[in-house]
Image (tube, helix red, strand yellow):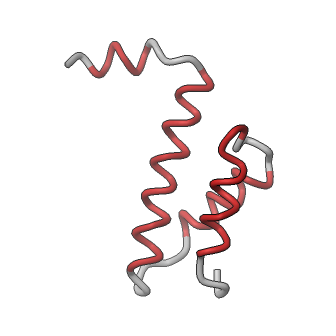
Amino acid sequence: MDYIAEIKGMTDEELRATCMLAVAHCVTDEMLDDSMPPYWIEILKEIYERGWAGDNREIIAEKLAEAPTTC
């Protein structure tokens, strides 16, 4: 599979959605490992606050609600 061509062929919306998915995976890792700083959780909060979530706004809100309150 030529993933580079696929990536370069993505629209801005598709690339943004893929990036948000990657951030969500990192958030999940942080939530499972208390020793990790909440870096990606803060990134996800910023994505949400800036209105970049688009159609994923509800999903991101749910993920943030699951995040530890110490973040």
- Left or right: residue 30 versus residue 64 is left
Q: Can you give x and y, in whole percent of width and height, for residue 49 in the image?
A: 79, 55
- Residue visible at 40% across and 86% down? 35
| Circle count | 0
- Residue visible at 50% across and 78% down? 37
Q: Can you give x and y, in whole percent of width and height, for residue 27 in the image?
A: 49, 65
Depicted 26 relative to depicted 20: above or below: below
- Residue visible at 64% across and 80% down? 71
Depicted 45 relative to depicted 11: above or below: below
Q: Can you give x and y, in whole percent of width and height, for residue 56 in the image?
A: 65, 45
- Left or right: residue 71 versus residue 21 is right
Residues 1 and 62: in front is: 62
> Could you tell me which quadrant the N terminus lies in?
top left
Residue 63 sits in quarter: bottom right
Residue found farthest to the left = 1
Residue 32 sits in quarter: bottom left
Depicted 2 relative to depicted 13: above or below: above
- Left or right: residue 19 versus residue 65 is left
